Every structure is written in structure tokens, then in C-alpha cells.
Amino acid sequence: MGALELKAVGKSFGKTEVIRGVDLTVEDGEFCVFVGPSGCGKSTLLRIIAGLEDASAGDILLDGQRINDVAPAKRELAMVFQSYALYPHLTVRDNMGLALKQAGVAKAEIAAATDKAADMLALGPLMDRRPAELSGGQRQRVAIGRAIVRRPKLFLFDEPLSNLDAALRVATRIEIARLHRELAATMIYVTHDQVEAMTLADKIVVLRAGRVEQVGAPMQLYNDPDNVFVAGFIGSPQ
Ligand code: ADP
Ligand code: MG
């Protein structure tokens, strides 16, 4: 049994089928990367796992429990978006602690959790600032810190580095890899960047038009892509 299992998951918007019969297992502690062209359904699949969209078909299991009907806030996962999605009127500290506050966690426990996440991400000096007083890279670190504070079983990242400049992208990518090791958490990470996929992933899932085209370890897909489409994304030149 994997940490996350998708069984015949489908999604239609009106008559348009955007996710088609997706079967997938993500193992406990695995770093799983979704790649594929723009519009192939990467974000939609992530949003279905997060509960931000309902699946039109199939089952989603987290640690063996079917979560299709579990409210997003009750799923033991946290999502980091490309756009940070921080509250402008709240300080970094309050942005990071908000989910715990809403869940009724005691103040001292929230402070301990936010301080620990701040340490991991070197956010200490920024805790009393508001998002407008931060750089893009700092905002994304706060968004990652906010996810860590909730101690989710599963982290979902939707192209978290695409708004950052090249140097910061590399630094933040290395930071995410370090967090994956330190937290021993399961992570699913969407990107269309081949280098990010190759360096971060234990397992790469190549999506095409709402279907899984191929799944494998980075070097396996690189050396032995099933077809020209997969090769075009991550394979060696054919
Ligand atoms: P990706 O993240 O891989 O670029 P998306 O998951 O965002 O792709 O989108 C997959 C397809 O679903 C696209 O054709 C997109 O236009 C469509 N889509 C996504 N969200 C909606 C929505 N809320 N209503 C209608 N169509 C949508
Ligand atoms: Mg997307």
C-alpha cells in the first residue's frame, strides 16, 4: 500500500475530459514529480488530490483511507502554489500559523511549530514582516514554511519555482530536496522543468492529455523512454 493511491481517477469540466483513468501509487517518503506539457492536467490532478476539485470518477486513497469525500482542510496534506497565496494583511508568523489557529491548536504549540519551521527555512528575521515587505524568493519560503507547520503526511507543490529567477530557482530547489530528506515526507511536485524533474524525483510521472504516459525513475525514463513523447520530455536523444 502506498502513501497515496489513485485508482481510475477521471475529471471532466462540462463535456471536456481533462483527466482520464489515472492509476498511480506514490510510496511513503517518495519524491514524485509530475511532468507534461501545459494543459495536460498536472494542476488539475494535484487539485483533485488536495480536494480543491472533486474527481468525476475513481478513488483517492491516503494511507489506505478513501478521501474523496474528506474536506480539503481535513486531508493530512499541504499544498504550495506557484503564486504563494499568502494573506497580505498578516505577518509571516501569522500566515504560517493560521491553519493551526483555525484548527484550534493552542497558542504555545503554534509558536513552537512556526519557530521550528522558521529555523528550517532561515525565516527568523522575517517573522514580523508582511508579504509586501518580502522578495519573491522569501515569499515562497514562507509558503513552504506554512506547509511544514501543518506537519502533513503529503506535500503537494505546483510549479513552486516558476516565479523565481534562475539563481533563486536553483537555491530553492536544493532547499526543497533538503526538506524532503529532513522531514522524510511524501512529496508530489509538478514542474515542466526537465532539470528539476531529473534532480528531485525518485519517480517521474509523465502526463499527456490527462493520461499517464509513463512512470519510472529518472534514469530509467532517460535511458529507456517508451516513445518519442517521453523522450522529448526527459529522454536522451533518440
Ligand atoms: P497543466 O497544469 O498541466 O497546465 P491544467 O490541469 O491546469 O493543466 O489544465 C488541464 C486542462 O483542464 C486544460 O485544458 C484547462 O484548460 C482545463 N481546465 C482546468 N481548470 C478548468 C476549469 N476550472 N474549468 C474548465 N476547464 C479547466
Ligand atoms: Mg498547471
Image (tube, helix red, strand yellow):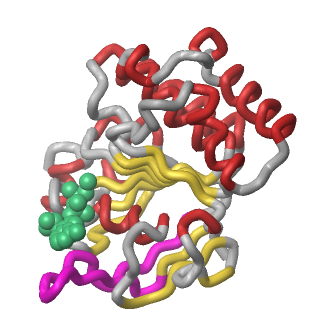
* Front one among 188 and 102: 102
Q: Position of residue 167 (x, y in %)?
A: 33, 14
Q: Position of residue 32 (x, y in %)?
A: 48, 54
Residue 36 on the magenta segment: no
Residue 25 on the magenta segment: yes
| Residue 194 appears left or right of 101 | left
User: Taking 237 as reference, is 226 above or below it?
Assistant: below
| Residue 212 appears left or right of 31 | left
Q: Position of residue 181 (x, y in %)?
A: 66, 37
Q: Position of residue 49 (x, y in %)?
A: 47, 68
Q: Residue at x 13, y 88 (%)?
A: 15
Q: Residue at x 67, y 57 (%)?
A: 153
Main secondary structure found in the magenta portion: strand
Q: Residue at x 55, y 75 (%)?
A: 5
* Front one among 62 and 79: 79
Q: Quadrant of ligand 1?
A: bottom left
| Residue 104 appears left or right of 126 | right
Kindly tell me whether residue 9 is visible in this rendering: yes
* Front one among 230 and 212: 212
- The image quarter containing residue 171 is top left
| Residue 176 appears left or right of 2 | left
- The image quarter containing residue 205 is bottom left
Task: Give the residues in magenta.
Answer: 7-26
- The image quarter containing residue 216 is bottom left
